[in-house]
Image (cartoon, rainbow, N blue to C red):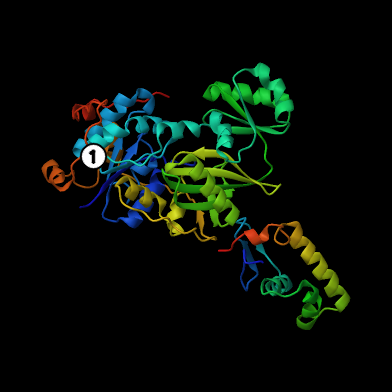
Amino acid sequence: MLDHLALSESGFLFDSRTGLTYTLSKSGTFLLRALIDGADAETLPERLVATFDVEPPVARKDVEQFLFRLTDIGILGHADADDEVAA
Amino acid sequence: MSLTIAVTGMNATDNPGPGVAVIRAIRDACPDCTIVGLAYETLDPGNFMPGIADHAYLLPYPSMGADALSDRLLAIHALTPIDVLVPTLDAELPVWVRLEGLLAAHGIRTFLPDADGLALRNKDRLHELADLGVSVPKSMVLTDPNSISKVADELGYPVVVKGRFYDAYVAQNAHDVAHWFHKLANSWGLPVIIQKFVPGTEFDVVCVGDGEGGLIGSVAMRKMQLTDKGKAWGGVTVRDRKLEAFVQDTVRALSWRGPCELEVMRGDDGGLYLIEINPRFPAWVYLSAGAGRNLPWAAVELALGREVAPMPPAPAGVMFLRHSVDQILPLSDFEALTVHGEIHREPIPDPEVADAARPAAAPAPALMAAPPADFNALATFPTEFPA
């Protein structure tokens, strides 16, 4: 559940649990929007390839790094995320 | 009937009192209310800000005693009859709590914690809340520097060294603790509180409790920028179900009555810890009105004995940014406050008309004689304060 995240089309992200804000690139916005809308993380590389001019190996690596970064800064992967609520 | 509401804490500086924010929130809910601003310093900017106080008065410092404060307030009350008093400063609250019965006898309502509740939130007693089931960091209360050697065994480093009333510093070892112990003891007296450092993120929550364990409303905020004193200069509302439950549990455990600010750490271990309770509205409380949960107005209504339904949680993502403005004012305003201790921007009410429009005051408590209002107090009010 990522309903604690408010992501605008411009790539401005607000985490309602922490009050922190972020600015995402166009491709980052695309990927996180897909996750918020319920996409499986496994499908992200092919979605990226279908939308952006990027080779599959690069897309896989980029998605992997992006998800790692989101987890590292606490946006994804909170064990108690289901206990949290959104705006 | 138009209400007259008196609010203290008019020092809208870079270390602001909550008065101006409380008044702005009350004005949002009640544009017709008459606002009496009560200040301890002539140069408190809230005394001079347009649209804030209809009448501004100086008060003697609480350290001058309850009699001086009550005499002055009742003299003000005789000129501009007050329906509700909202105190907003830590140092004055014990005195106002003691005077609650006297004020009620004169028709001045308040909605404050009782003396026991107020004492329990003192920094040197915060650890006692653990007995009530509230999660607080482990702490020690030191009155003697010889006990500093025990900190390592009992708490482990790092720790936060806190003054009795204000200030807190992180200490990494006994040498640091000794340094801050002497500095804080010198500034604020003993004891000094040593609290286990909780690494994590701080959230501040403004609340109003109904005094029976219920939470009327709360707004949680994360500071986005700070002054060099650590005061919020900008922030954003947040929502977190665990934090909301923590706040409800804390207010229930304390049966807190009136406004308060809870300072809560979300530890890196995922736990929530209460690190401080301020027994009054914080200076950022106008954010509560901005987020659609007008807690100052709720406190006024509760003081008036009105039913106030518990409010749903405030939405996340409402921001505030503080700013500073050079306020131009006529020297006559400064003169009025300096010489007479008061400024009037609205006509002073006709006492007979005002009395007729007001409900009867509560009966005087048996053990408290209500001194008559003393107009001379206005003329003899001191214009110089102790440092």
For the C terminus of chain B, which image quadrant? top left
* Res A21 visible: no
* Res A61 visible: yes
Instruction: Determine which quarter of the picture holds residue A11.
Output: bottom right
Instruction: Determine which quarter of the picture holds residue B382.
Output: top left
Work out whether B270 lies above or below B129: below
In terms of secondary structure, where does tag 1 sit?
A: loop
Count of labels shown?
A: 1
Work out whether B296 lies above or below A82: above
Chain at tag 1: B
Q: Residues within 10 Å of mark 1 (few under 14, many from 20)?
A: many
Work out whether B2 lies above or below B368: below
Q: Residue at x 77, y 79 (%)?
A: A47
Seen in the image, is B197 located left or right of residue B122?
right
Seen in the image, is A8 located left or right of residue B70?
right
User: Hey, which residue is sitting farthest left in the picture?
Assistant: B352
Residue B175 horizontal/vertical position (percent): 72, 24
Residue B330 horizontal/vertical position (percent): 30, 43
Work out whether B117 lies above or below B202: above
Q: Residue at x 32, y 38 (%)?
A: B38
Residue B201 horizontal/vertical position (percent): 64, 47
Seen in the image, is B135 located left or right of residue B285?
right
Q: Nearer the viewer, residue A22 or B85?
A: B85
- Mark 1 — residue? B107
Q: Amino acid at mark 1?
A: Gly
Residue B141 horizontal/vertical position (percent): 60, 25
User: Hey, which residue is sitting farthest bottom in the picture?
Assistant: A50
